[in-house]
Amino acid sequence: MFENLTERLGQTLNRLRGQGRITEDNIKESLREIRMALLEADVALPVVRELVEAIKDKAVGTEVLKSLTPGQTLVKVVHDELIRLMGGANESLNLAQQPPAVVLVAGLQGAGKTTSVAKLARRLIERDKKKVLVASVDIYRPAAIDQLRVLADEVGATFFPSDSGQQPEKIAQGAVSYGRSHGMDVVIIDSAGRLHIDQEMMAEIQRVHAAIQPVETLFVVDSMTGQDAAHTAQAFNQALPLTGVILTKTDGDARGGAALSIRQITGKPIKFLGVGEKSTALEPFHPDRVVSRILGMGDVLSLVEEVERHVDRDQAAKLAKKLNKGKGFDLEDFREQLQQMSRMGGMANLLDKLPGMGNMAQVAKEKVNDKEFKRIEAIICSMTPLERRKPDVINGSRKRRIAAGSGVQVQDVNRLLKQFSQMQKMMKQFSKGGMAKMMRALKGRLPPGGMPGMPF
C-alpha cells in the first residue's frame, strides 16, 4: 500500500537537500509535487487542498535546525499533518459494556464484509480471549450465510444459523439473545450487501440497527475504490451512526487515497486494515505507523509486535546458541526461518515495515516473492534429515529424487543449494560481528541523515 505515493514524496522531499531555509520559492515546486502525488494517489480534492495549505503554513519560513536539512524539516511537517489528517491515534473497538457487546458490520457487496467479520472474530478470540458469536442477516444470498458458517468454523467462532425465510431484524435479535444466554462476550452481525447504495438497503439496515442497538457499527469498504470509498462511507454514515471503518484489500492498493480521505470526509476513524486473504490478515490502523511507511521510515513498532507474536523464542535462542558455538546454519534451520517469516505475513509484509527501504522494498518484492519461498520450503521438505543437516552429501541421484518429490526441476535444487551456500557464509559473518559492517554499508541507502538512534 502507498508504494506510488512513497516514491513520489521521496523524490520531492529529497530535492530540498542543502538549502539553508525553507522559503516560498524553494518550497513552491515541492508543494506542487506533493499535490500531484496526492491526487495521483486518488485522495479527494478537498482533502488535498486542505493538507497542502496546512503544510505550506507550517513549513514556510521554518528555521532549519543545526542537525537537519530543509528536506528533513519538511518531512517532519508532512509527517505531522498526515497523522492529523488520518485521526492522530488508533481507535480500538469499544467493547466495555455488559456482555455481549454487539457489533454490526455494514458495506457494499464485494467489499470483503463477510471475510472481515471472520478476521475480526479471530482477532478477538486469539488476542483478547473473547467468546465470539457470528450471525448473517443476508437473507438474499444463501451462499453468504454458508460462507460465514465455514469461516466461523475456521476461526473458532460460534455460528448462529439463519435462513432466507426469516426477517433480518429477527435474526439479529435472536443472535443477540442466544449470545446473552450462552455467555458470549461479543456478537458480530454480518448485514446484507448490495451492489450499490439504495433506499431499500438503507431502510433494512436501519431496522436491524434499531433492533439490536450495537455498541459498534463498522463500515467495510474496498480501499481500491479510492476516494469513492470515502464518499460511500459518508453516505452510510448519514443513514447509520457509524463508529468506525474497516478498509479492505489494502495489500493490492498501491495508491492509498481511501486511507487518506475517509477520516476527513466522514469524521469517522479507520479502525482496521485488511492486508491479505488469510483470516489473520487484519491489522489495527495506527495513523502514525502508516505515515511512517508512506514517508519511507518503516514501521518498526508493528514489526516488533509481529515478531513478539509469531517468533518462537526458544527456537530463536537455540539457533543463536548453535551459531555462537560455531556450528553451521543448516537447511533445517533455514526451513524454520521461512516458516516463521510466513507466520509474520511473508517477505512483502516485512519489507514494508523495515526503515529506509524505500524503492529497495519494491525491487526486492519483485525479485523474491512468497511463492518462491513456498517452493524452497517444498524442496527442503523433500530432503532427508541427513541431507538437511549436511547438504554436501546431496549428489546427482539425490537431487533427482528431491526434485521429483517437490515437483521442481533439478536446476531448481541446484539453485537453492548455491544460494544456501552463500547464506551459510553470511551467517558465519554475523556470528563474528559482521552485522555492524553490513549496516555501515547500508548507511548510504537510508533516508537523508540516516535513521534516528543509529550509532553511525
Image: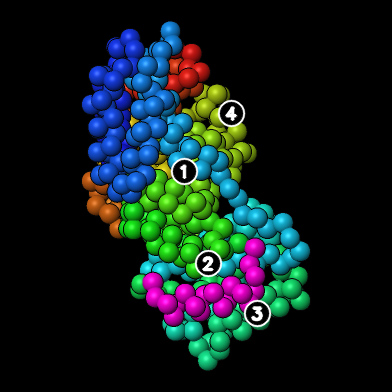
Query: Does label 2 or label 1 sit earlier along the sequence?
Result: 1
The residue under the point 43% across, 74% down is 193
Q: What is the three-letter code of the residue carrying label 4? A: Lys
* Mark 3, residue position: 173
Q: Residues within 10 Å of mark 3 (few under 14, many from 20)?
A: some
Which residues fall within the magenta stretch?
197-215
- Residue 75 showing in the rendered view: no
Cα separation, mark 2 vs mark 3, equals 18 Å
* Mark 2, residue position: 240
| Residue 208 vertical placement versus 222 (above, below) | below
Q: Residues within 10 Å of mark 2 (few under 14, many from 20)?
A: some
Query: Does label 4 or label 1 sit earlier along the sequence?
Result: 1
Front-lying residue, 273 or 300:
273
Determine which quarter of the picture holds residue 143.
bottom left
Element at label 4: helix
| Residue 41 vertical placement versus 355 (above, below) | below
Element at label 2: loop
In the rendered view, does 307 fall on the left or right side of 261? right
* Mark 1, residue position: 86
Determine which quarter of the picture holds residue 124.
bottom right
